[in-house]
Amino acid sequence: MKLATIRHNGEEIAALIEGDGVFLMNQVNELSGNQWSEKSLPLLQNGELSELTTWYNSEGKQKLQKQNGLAVKEVLFAPLFRTPEKVLGVGMNYLEKALELSGKPPEVEPVVFMKPNSSLIGQGEAIEIPSQSPNVAGEAELAIIIGQTCENVEEADFHNVIAGFTTSLDMTAKDIQNQNPVYLQRAKSFNTFCSFGPYLITADEFSDLASIKVETVLNGDVCHGNIIANMMYQPAFIVSFFSKIMTLQPGDVILTGTPGSVLIREGDTLECRVSGFSSLTNTVKKRP
């Protein structure tokens, strides 16, 4: 099932994507006879996503295919939500990327960081280059969305605690990071430095996560690409790792690392392509 957030009548509201149609949650509620939340984050926080997925798989998909929805090409997408409790990230998660940045194989544990909610943007919004760092790198990543409150999760229970996956773009102020690696958190935290969406695809849609390909694309050219199987720290390990540090909450976003980054400039278009997803695309401009 594909869940998205779109801009409609001045609001950012949840919708299901079925084929080329976009179905607002009030239409879904009428079809199903339910009163599920009409925004994406409450759907997760209230434990309603699993009910919605069950309905979709049992009868909802067929019902939606008989309805008239908005056209995908005509709607404006927003990030899945603006205020998750936390956005977590893993750096240097492909060997090639680790060697590029540090010149040596990775440590025993992953490099981790956090992104503030003020960094979040969605499909079509502009990434802003800050005056403090004109050299900004952008990188495509598969992101995990947590589906329930959990801690001390074992890798075998990974699919029981996640809601699904989405596409993401993670930006880094390279001038700041290059001054000293300990400045990584500051380099990751500028406004507009994390884009995600437009779709959350539920975990049940992925039978072979390892074969999914992630590509960083600049101005239409594929610059880097790799498959999940080549991650040093697999998604199940990453969720388990973070859950043994802190309690994870529904709607938490975890960026899983990139196959490679590219320097971006004003006027560029940066894109994340992940197998099975609609591309996530953002333009680039200088911060006012």
Image: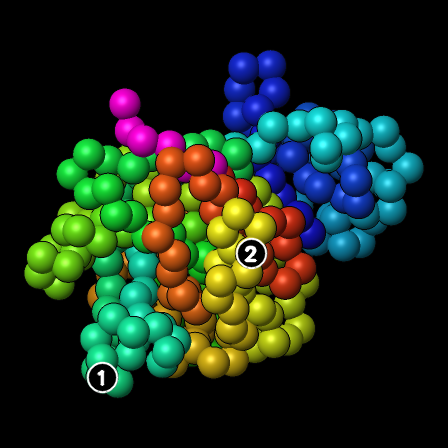
Say whether residue 275 is left or right of residue 33.
Answer: left
| Label 1 neighbour load within 10 Å: few <14, some 14-19, many 20+ | few
State which quadrant residue 72 falls in: top right
**Residue that numbered label 2 is attached to:** 221
State which quadrant residue 154 falls in: bottom left
Secondary structure beneath label 2: strand
Q: Is residue 250 above or below residue 93?
A: above
Is-magenta flag for residue 162?
no
x and y percent of residue 151 in the render?
A: 32, 65
Q: Is residue 125 above or below residue 184?
A: above
Three-letter code, disc 2? Asp
Say whether residue 136 is left or right of residue 122.
Answer: left
**Residue that numbered label 1 is attached to:** 104
Q: Is residue 26 above or below residue 52?
A: above
Three-letter code, disc 1? Lys
Say which of marks 2 and 1 sits in front.
2
Q: Main secondary structure of the magenta part?
A: strand
- The residue closer to the viewer here, 68 or 283, is 283
Color encoding of the figure:
rainbow
Residue 48 visible to an observer of this rendering: no
Q: Which residues are the magenta region?
A: 283-288
Q: Determine the residue positioned at 31% across, 65% down.
A: 90
Q: Is residue 157 above or below residue 216?
A: below
Sequence order check: which comes first, mark 2 or mark 1?
1
Q: Determine the residue positioned at 87% across, 32% down.
A: 67
Picture quarter with the C terminus: top left
Secondary structure beneath label 1: loop
x and y percent of residue 102 in the render?
A: 21, 75
Q: Determine the residue positioned at 44% across, 35% down.
A: 267
